[in-house]
Image: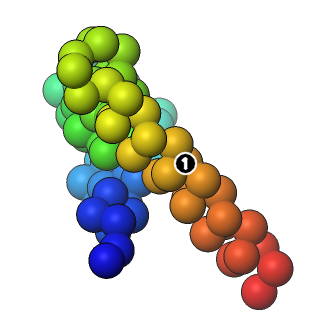
Amino acid sequence: MGQPWGTEPVIGSTAVSVARAVIAVAQSADAIPHELATALADSVLEAKLVRLALEVREGSPQAARRAIELATLILDTTASHAAEELA
């Protein structure tokens, strides 16, 4: 049986899209609208890695399970990046 937390990307496609928009606006020498900056922050805060870290910090009865999920996600991501670098 696979681990359910290993299938979701660490940073979602929304965060990537908004990050690209922020960079595009910054490169055009325009001021970055507050709404765009907030959208970027919100999309990062919705990322699984961040959500799990916040749940661990809350100290709920599920904190230990969330810590295991967080640790596994970090290690899986690190291993994935290392494998990509070797390829």
Front-lying residue, 24 or 68:
68
Q: Residue at coordinates 36% horizontally, 15% vertically from top-left?
A: 57
Q: Residue 54's image quarter?
A: top left
Front-lying residue, 20 or 15:
15
Q: Is residue 83 visible?
A: yes
Q: Seen from this angle, which residue lies furthest right?
A: 86
Tag 1 secondary structure: helix
Q: Residue at coordinates 35% horizontally, 66% vertically from top-left?
A: 3
Q: Is residue 33 visible?
A: no
Q: Find residue 60 and report its horizontal and vertical position in percent.
A: 22, 17
Q: Seen from this angle, which residue lies furthest left?
A: 35
Q: Residue at coordinates 37% horizontally, 29% vertically from top-left?
A: 64
Type of amino acid under label 1:
Ile
In the visual, does 78 lie left or right of 39?
Answer: right
Q: Residue at coordinates 18% horizontally, 26% vertically from top-left?
A: 35
Q: Residue 86's image quarter?
A: bottom right
Q: Find residue 39 and report its horizontal and vertical position in percent.
A: 21, 34
Front-lying residue, 47 or 52:
52
Q: Seen from this angle, which residue lies furthest bottom?
A: 87
